[in-house]
Amino acid sequence: MNMDDLPNSFLVFVGTKVLDGCNEAGAMLILLVQCVREAPQAMRRKHRLIIQMKRVGPDSLFIAGALALFIGMVLALHSGYSLRQFDFEEALAPIVALSMVKEMAPVITALLLSGRIGAAIAAEIGTMQVNEEIDALHTLGISPVRYLAIPRLIGCVAMLPLLTIYAGIVGMYGGALVAATYFDISYTVYFQRAFDSMEMKDVMEGLLKALLFGAIIAIVACHRGFSTRGGAEGVGRAITTCVVTSFIAIIICDYFVTRFMM
Amino acid sequence: MSENAGKTYDVIAEKLNKSFGANHVLRDFTLSVEKGQTFVIVGPSGSGKSVFLKHLVGLITPDSGEVVVLSKKINELPPEELLALRRRIGMVFQSSALLNSLTVEENVGLGLTEHGLIGQEEVLKIVNEKLALVEMSGKNQLLPEELSGGMRKRVAVARTLALGPDMILFDEPTVGLDPLLSSNVDELILGLKKNVKCTNIVVTHDLITAFRVADRIGMFHDGKIVAIGAPEEFRRSQDKSVQEFIARNRDWRI
């Protein structure tokens, strides 16, 4: 390759990637609009919604709880030792509580679910796509969006906020454990300070994030599943790109919601 | 149906063109299939016959040309009307395409349950009736992974029959089956011709199936139908690609 062509080919590479990204984002937006438009018909099949909700919520309780507990403990440990240097340990509970409620609980739970549920959805729909099962649904006059995507979207959007509340409480409890063990702060004092420092707006910020992250996980996973091509290898690629895309989208969305809520 | 010179047609394809990248699969493809007829399209595997079949249910849209199925221009239908039309067209896929997470009974009753037009008891009655028609009675609770290739094909046929289609499309119905199972599938299609009396379009590379079940046969070559006729007429065709295809298939299933 001629060295003079390098800047040109770099621009072509970047331009292609940006265009691909815009196409993907557009396709996901169309899928979201389709889901919203067809949701009333899909809501009639309640058993399917319940199956998806159970899969996202109750089935993730143990792992989400364990993750939140240790995140809360690590937060308390880090903050506690730093605050001790300034003799300001009373700020420990508010720091852990606000970090958990506004940031850590929604983000960590969403990242966990995009790996656990998002990947599973992409694999499931992707396998159906390469096995012509999605085409079969079309030929039976069944909308795959109604049959597959909407129950999964509702499952994620309904359960992620609940899981976030649960993770927030468990994370705060993890912080309380560390505060009581290493910094001589009793549970009563810890929780009193934690709740005194919190406002409704903080809880709403966490829940809004959870709601949006739930939609991101489901839409990215369903879109990746539906656009799977190329057999088992294609399914593998769909899962990887699903998890990577969700991670990036969640973090970007997190920044903008945080900025918007300030 | 569209009427032309006293005949009614369930399928009219006019100058269809479809390319995938540099691969021009359909070239001015033109074909009409009469109502109630069993039309078989033969041609080598991987030549694009299935692509035409997928045009008939709107799974693929042509680059140019027009497809009229059951009197509807399929590419101009809004999504809800397209879903409604698809309920009148059954398709049996090459891989059978049963939903692997559902039992035989759930697969066969899927369309009926989803459209919610009848109660669960009525659905079960129709499911059992269609399973009996394809000789799969009593297999209701099995999962697709527990079935042989031929049994899956039968369940796939029962699934399409459950919706009472006006037309059934078979995509390579005997591919991957041993000669005995292939023969069973031929019998199944013949049984449908006799009992269900809907229009059948079969895409296959298997000439034995073609000659056994067809009312008319079309030879797919180079993106279009190059020869067409009743089985005996087709056998006598002087078209080079037909003769070559017949010669290559002579020992098949012997």
Image (cartoon, grey):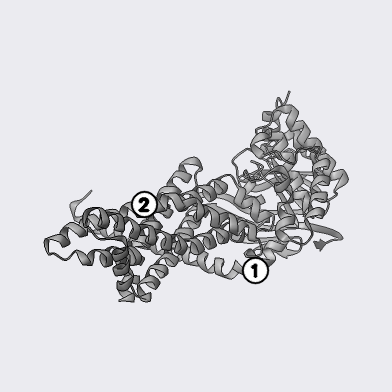
User: Height in image: B141 above or below A65?
Assistant: above
Picture residue at 36% right of the left edge, 66% below the top: A253
Picture residue at 26% right of the left edge, 65% below the top: A95
Q: Secondary structure at mark 2?
A: helix
Picture residue at 72% right of the left edge, 26% below the top: B253
Question: Is residue B241 shown left or right of residue A229?
Answer: right
Residue B176, given in percent of the width and then of the height, sits at 65, 33
Picture residue at 79% right of the left edge, 60% below the top: B118
Q: Quadrant of residue A205?
A: bottom left
> Alpha-carbon neighbours of circle 2 within 10 Å: few (<14), some, or many (≥20)?
some
* Label 1 sits on residue: B78
Of B105 and B4, which appears nearest the observer?
B105
User: Height in image: A123 above or below A37?
Assistant: above
Of B200 and B96, which appears nearest the observer?
B96
Question: Is residue B56 shown left or right of residue B191?
Answer: left
Q: Which mark is residue A67?
A: 2
Name the kind of residue labelled 2 in the image.
Leu
Name the kind of residue labelled 1 in the image.
Pro
Circles 2 and 1, Cβ within 8 Å, touching? The answer is no
* Nearer mark to the viewer, of 2 and 1: 2
Q: Furthest residue to the left? A: A85
Residue B148, given in percent of the width and then of the height, sits at 68, 32
Of A95 and A11, which appears nearest the observer?
A95
Q: Is residue B121 in sight in this rendering?
A: yes
Q: Is residue B41 in sight in this rendering?
A: no
Question: Is residue A184 shown left or right of residue B168?
Answer: left
Label 1 marks a residue whose chain is B
